[in-house]
């Protein structure tokens, strides 16, 4: 089948040797690429019950049939592994020329197993001792540029911080601790290059469809992202009372006007840029005021490309990317309204290689623990000057930073005394910047998400603003609508196309089928892609089931089920546990699973994997796993 190369490169870091392993067309038709193919490979390669940081745990880079074509935003790759934060599947996406270089190797994925005997880099198909250990991912990419396009980790990944990310072209595969998985293998970076073109079935049709998508993507559907970027959501979210503040104790932040990007234009140097193969240009970069981002020098100080090293041993960060989730997590969630300190903290996370959502939420949780007298000598709300120091402590695992590097769930277990009730996490992954009590379809999406508290694998927050949906209460439509957004996300994340393209598709499944058919030569239909999307969701859920998922894991922290919002536009909003339980039950039944969320044996057998099954309430729980020899077409 065209569009694919029909194989993946499996490299054993312990043996410093790789091999190409074929993938049947039937599997590619069912999984496509990205998170779908990555999830299937994870079932193939990960031993049941493996420690995510053990050498045997695989780290998977997965491409897609659209990579290497002219479709806008298609230069993306997925990184898939068992998460050291959640113990379940983690799949993160990044936009980068690394994706194009990887596909040009003539493979559909790269799977790393084993571990290096010493800190190393993988270049030109072989390991060499690292010359970049201790450097930022950006510095590493510059050093290794002669060897191709680079994906690398920062010091947080080297120190196995459980929410460390990995970076390529300054874009991050951010959530779930995939940088820690790479660090556990003592692999600093991987550089890829190749010259194999993506084969397409109908090049003229592909070009015509690509032109149409570029034209639509340059229109009204993406205008707000071009004009303000994602951080343009902050002020509107605050006005709606859905902006999480001070560790989700509130949903309205009095300092939000200071952090509003609308108020920065004309007062702060600013430029736009785009990801690889993207014509949308949602990225906005802003200058940080001189003198506002200085941090005390230490033996572990990290210096990045935008850092001006001063003679007195202090650093000054001049410019950084601005994204909503980073500003929310390092600003309102921590009670900080100083824009320069928030931007400096975001840049620091990029340098150190940490997911801004998880580190910000973990810091905010520690701050509330301090307010309650549960944690001494920790970070405090409304203390912007201390933020950079705490980020360094977390990344280097110094002092209390060592406990915070484990994430909010493990920190709550360390603190005890009921702290788990207000730890902002689901299945171990920290919540994104949306208040679930005031967005109750989103609350459902967060509770059932296979990755944990996740807004990118489900667009349920958009549903809360649809006609006929009460965002403060949810309704009978919530389950079906949440499933629809989850299925669409699964398809986009396997194609792989940017989520911002979804508004540029006039008819989602027919448009996707037309693009895939033109590239591959296989006649994909809208109905077949709906089935593919549902199968990918099943595939990810099946991995979590085999790794020990239980129905009680699908929930929200106690705070959201027992406390009402007490201020702001969403004052009085609450999410009783019985309402969430009813929505989850409806979701599971609508998916075709058991009421408790177990996958029926018939569904598992169609995924190219086989469980040793035992019946549980009409579904299945794992005993063993083996890979099926063939997959039904």
Image (cartoon, helix red, strand yellow):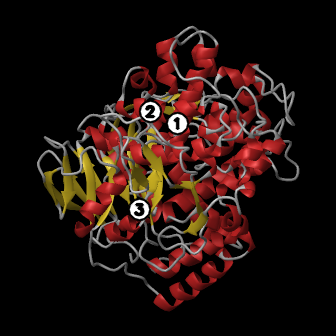
What residue does disc 3 label? 169
> Where does the image place residue 556, in percent across and percent down from the top left?
64, 28
Q: Nearer the viewer, residue 487 or 260?
A: 260
Q: Nearer the viewer, residue 390 or 422?
A: 390
Q: Give the residue displayed 47% in from the left and 55% down from the top.
A: 93
What is the residue that sits farthest to the front in this orientation?
Answer: 311
What residue does disc 1 label? 358
> Where does the image place residue 102, in percent across and percent down from the top left?
32, 66
Q: Give the residue displayed 51% in from the left and 52% down from the top.
A: 536
Q: Give the residue displayed 46% in from the left and 36% down from the top.
A: 544
Q: Give the residue displayed 42% in from the left and 52% down from the top.
A: 307
Nearer the observer, disc 1 or disc 2? 1
Q: Earlier in the sequence, mark 1 or mark 2?
A: 2
Secondary structure type for disc 1: helix
Q: Is residue 461 left or right of residue 621?
A: right
Res. 110 in view: no
Asked which quadrant contains residue 213, the reply is bottom right
What residue does disc 2 label? 85
Q: CA distance from mark 3 to mark 1?
A: 21 Å
Relative to 586, residue 207 above or below: below
Q: Are marks 1 and 2 in contact (CB under 8 Å)?
A: yes
Name the image quarter holding the N terminus. Answer: bottom left
Q: CA distance from mark 1 to mark 2?
A: 10 Å
Q: Earlier in the sequence, mark 2 or mark 3?
A: 2
């Amino acid at each position: 089948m065209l569009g694919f190369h029909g194989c993946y490169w499996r490299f054993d870091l312990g043996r410093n040797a790789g091999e190409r392993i074929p993938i049947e067309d039937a599997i590619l038709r069912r999984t496509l690429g990205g998170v779908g193919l990555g999830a299937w490979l994870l079932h193939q390669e990960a031993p049941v019950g493996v420690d995510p940081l053990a050498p045997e745990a695989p780290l998977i880079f997965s491409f897609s049939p659209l990579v290497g074509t002219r479709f806008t935003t298609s230069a993306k790759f997925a990184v898939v592994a068992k998460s050291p934060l959640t113990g379940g599947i983690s799949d993160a996406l990044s936009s980068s020329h690394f994706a194009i270089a990887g596909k040009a190797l003539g493979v559909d994925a790269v799977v790393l197993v084993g571990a290096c005997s010493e800190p190393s880099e993988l270049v030109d198909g072989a390991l060499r001792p690292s010359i970049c250990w201790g450097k930022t991912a950006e510095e590493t990419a510059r050093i290794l540029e002669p060897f191709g396009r680079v994906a690398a980790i920062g010091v947080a990944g080297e120190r196995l911080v459980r929410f460390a990310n990995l970076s390529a072209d300054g874009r991050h595969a951010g959530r779930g601790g995939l940088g820690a998985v790479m660090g556990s293998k003592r692999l600093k970076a991987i550089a890829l290059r190749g010259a194999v073109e993506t084969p397409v079935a109908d090049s003229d049709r592909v070009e015509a469809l690509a032109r149409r998508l570029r034209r639509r993507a340059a229109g009204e559907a993406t205008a707000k992202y071009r004009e303000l970027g994602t951080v343009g959501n902050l002020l509107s979210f605050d006005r709606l009372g859905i902006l999480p503040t001070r560790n989700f104790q509130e949903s309205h932040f009095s300092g939000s006007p200071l952090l509003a990007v609308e108020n920065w234009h004309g007062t702060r140097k600013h430029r736009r840029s785009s990801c690889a193969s993207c014509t949308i240009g949602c990225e906005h970069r802003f200058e940080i005021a001189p003198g506002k981002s200085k941090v005390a020098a230490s033996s572990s100080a990290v210096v990045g490309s935008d850092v001006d090293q001063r003679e007195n041993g202090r650093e000054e960060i001049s410019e950084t990317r601005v994204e909503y989730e980073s500003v929310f997590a390092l600003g309102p969630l921590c009670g900080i309204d100083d824009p320069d300190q928030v931007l400096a903290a975001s840049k620091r996370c990029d340098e150190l290689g940490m997911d801004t959502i998880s580190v910000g939420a973990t810091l905010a949780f520690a701050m509330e623990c301090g307010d309650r007298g549960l944690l001494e000598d920790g970070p405090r709300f409304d203390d912007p000057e201390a933020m950079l120091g705490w980020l360094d402590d977390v990344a280097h695992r110094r002092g209390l930073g060592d406990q915070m590097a484990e994430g909010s769930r493990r920190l709550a277990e360390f603190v005890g005394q009921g702290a788990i009730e207000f730890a902002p996490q689901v299945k171990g992954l920290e919540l994104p910047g949306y208040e679930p009590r005031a967005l109750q379809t989103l609350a459902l999406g967060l509770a059932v998400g296979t990755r944990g508290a996740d807004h990118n694998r489900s667009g349920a927050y958009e549903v809360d603003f649809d006609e006929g949906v009460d965002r403060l209460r949810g309704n009978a439509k919530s389950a079906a609508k949440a499933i629809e957004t989850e299925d669409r996300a699964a398809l986009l994340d396997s194609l792989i196309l940017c989520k911002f393209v979804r508004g540029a598709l006039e008819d989602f499944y027919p448009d996707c089928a037309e693009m895939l058919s033109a590239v591959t030569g296989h006649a994909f239909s809208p109905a077949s892609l709906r089935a593919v999307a549902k199968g990918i969701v099943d595939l990810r859920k099946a991995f979590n089931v085999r790794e020990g998922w239980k129905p009680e894991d699908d929930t929200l922290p106690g705070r959201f089920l027992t406390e009402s919002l007490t201020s702001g536009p969403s004052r009085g909003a609450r999410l009783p546990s019985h309402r969430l339980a009813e929505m989850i039950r409806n979701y599971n039944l609508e998916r075709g699973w058991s009421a408790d969320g177990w996958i029926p044996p018939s569904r598992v057998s169609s995924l190219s994997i086989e469980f040793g099954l035992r019946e549980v309430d009409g579904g299945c729980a794992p005993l063993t796993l083996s890979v099926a020899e063939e997959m039904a077409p």
